[in-house]
Image (cartoon, helix red, strand yellow):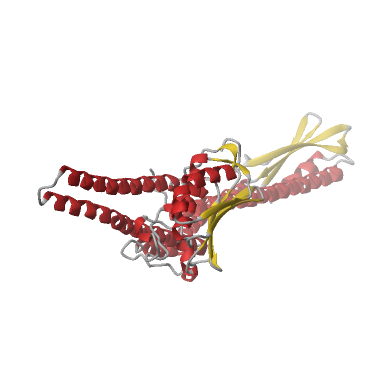
Amino acid sequence: MKDKSIQTSLSRWFAIQTLIGLSFVCVAVYAATRWSFQLKQSEEFTRYIELVQHVVEETSNPPDLDALRHKLGDYFLSHPDAAAAVWVGKEQVYLPPGPAAKGNWVTQDRMLEGLAIDGKPIKLQLTLDVSKDDLLLRRLAWTLFLATTLGSLLVAFTGSLVVRRGLKQLKLLAAKTAEAGPENAGIRIDASKYASELQPWVGQFNALLERVQGAYEQLESFNADVAHELRTPLANMIAQAEVELSQARSVTALQDALSSQLEEAHRLSNIVTDMLFLSKADRGARARRTGPVSIAEQVAAVAEFHEAELEASELSLKIDGDANLLVDVGLLRRAVSNLVSNAIRYATPQSLIRVAIEQEGSAVKLFVDNRGEPIDPSALPHLFERFYRADRSRSGSSSHHGLGLTIVSAIARMHGGSTFASSGGGVTRIGILLAQPESSGD
C-alpha cells in the first residue's frame, strides 16, 4: 500500500489551490490590460481619421491634391507609428513617403462619409504600429507567469512548514500512545495538553484503555477462578487415587472410590460445559425463540424438578402471575432452575419461595423471592459475575462453582434482557427481564 503523508498531501493541495487561484487572477489581469490596449488603439484610429477628414475638408473646396499630399506628408512624417493612404475614386492620391518600418502594423480601411473630391468618394487606409503594445503584453504575460509559479512554490513550501508544525502534536500523541501496554496498564493521556480537535480522540483512546484494562483484569480474575475451581476436584481425585493405590483394596472399596472419582469428574465436566456456554453467550449468541409459551407453565415444570430439594429443605414454592412470550424454552427453564436452586440454597427453612411473573410493557419480568440472611448491598452488583460468591461461609457455597447466576445473566442477554437483584427486610429478590423479540424470526 502506498505510504500517504498528510504533510505532503496538504502541501500539494495548497500549491494546486494557489496555482489555480493565481492563474485566474493573472488571466483576468492580462485580459483587462489587453482590452485597455485595444481601446487605446481604437481611440488612436479615431483621432487619425478625424485628422485626415479635416485635411480633406480643407483641400477639397476648391480641390487641391498637392496641398492634401503636402499636409498629410508633413503630419505623418512626424508620427512614425502611423501611416495613411488616400484614394479619390480609384486614383491613389497619397502614399506613405517610404517603406513601413519593422513592427506589428494594424490596418483599417474607411470610406470618409460625406466627403468627396470632384464628386468622387474618398477612401482612407490607416495603419498603426502596435509593436510597443505587443511588447508590453508579452512582458506582462511572462511577469504574471513567473509570479504564479513562484507564488505557488512559495505557498507549497510555507504550507509544508505550517502543516509540519500542526502535525507536531500528532507525533507527540503517537509517542504517548506507544507507551501504553500491559506493563503500563494505568497510563492515561492528558487531553488538555492537545488541540481541541484531538481531545475527543484522546478521550476515546482513554476510554478504550479503560475497557481493555477492565477486560484484562477480568480475564486474569477469570483464569485465577478457573484454576481455583478446577484445582480442588483434581486434588481430591489425585489424593483419593493415591490412597486407594497405596494398599490392597476390596472390589467394593474400589467401586466406591471410582464412584467418588466419577462424581468429581462430573463436577469438572459441568464447570467446563458452563464455561463453554458462557463463552458462546459472550460471542453474541442469540436465543432461538419459539412460542409464544406460558412462562408460568415453564416455572411450574422447573418447580416440579426441584420438588425433592424443596421437601428436603422444608420449603414451599408459589407462582404468581403469568405472561406469554416467545422464548427459548430450554434456556428459560435453565435460568429459572438456577434462580430457584439459588433461592432453595439460601432460604430460611420452612419458608415460602415466591416466583412472580409480571408484564412490564412489552417485556416480561420474572423474579424469585426467598426469605433468609440478607446480602451485603456492596455484593449485589457482583452477584452475576463468574465464580462470585457473596459469602463463602454461607451454607452451600462450597458445593457450587459460582456460575449459576452468571448463566442466568447470559440467558437474559440472549433474550435481549437484563438481570436485577435486591436484598432487604429479610427478603432477597433476584430476577430477569426478558424482552420481546425484535422480529418474529429472532
The residue closer to the viewer here, 424 or 276, is 424
Give left or right: position of 254 versus 369: left
Spot the residue most to the left.
Answer: 247
The residue closer to the viewer here, 376 or 282, is 376
The vertical placement of 173 against 1, above or below, is below
Residue 130 on image: x %, y %:
64, 46
The quadrant of the image that shows the C terminus is top right
For residue 158, say whether it is visible. Answer: no
Give left or right: position of 1 versus 298: left
Give left or right: position of 355 versus 182: right
Residue 10 on image: x %, y %:
48, 54
The residue closer to the viewer here, 49 or 303, is 303
Give left or right: position of 40 versus 25: right
Q: How many marks?
A: 0
Q: Residue at x 37, y 48 (%)?
A: 275
For residue 237, say whether it is visible. Answer: yes
Spot the residue most to the top.
Answer: 90
The residue closer to the viewer here, 156 or 411, is 411
Q: Residue at x 37, y 66 (%)?
A: 393
The quadrant of the image that shows the N terminus is top left
Residue 201 on image: x %, y %:
49, 60
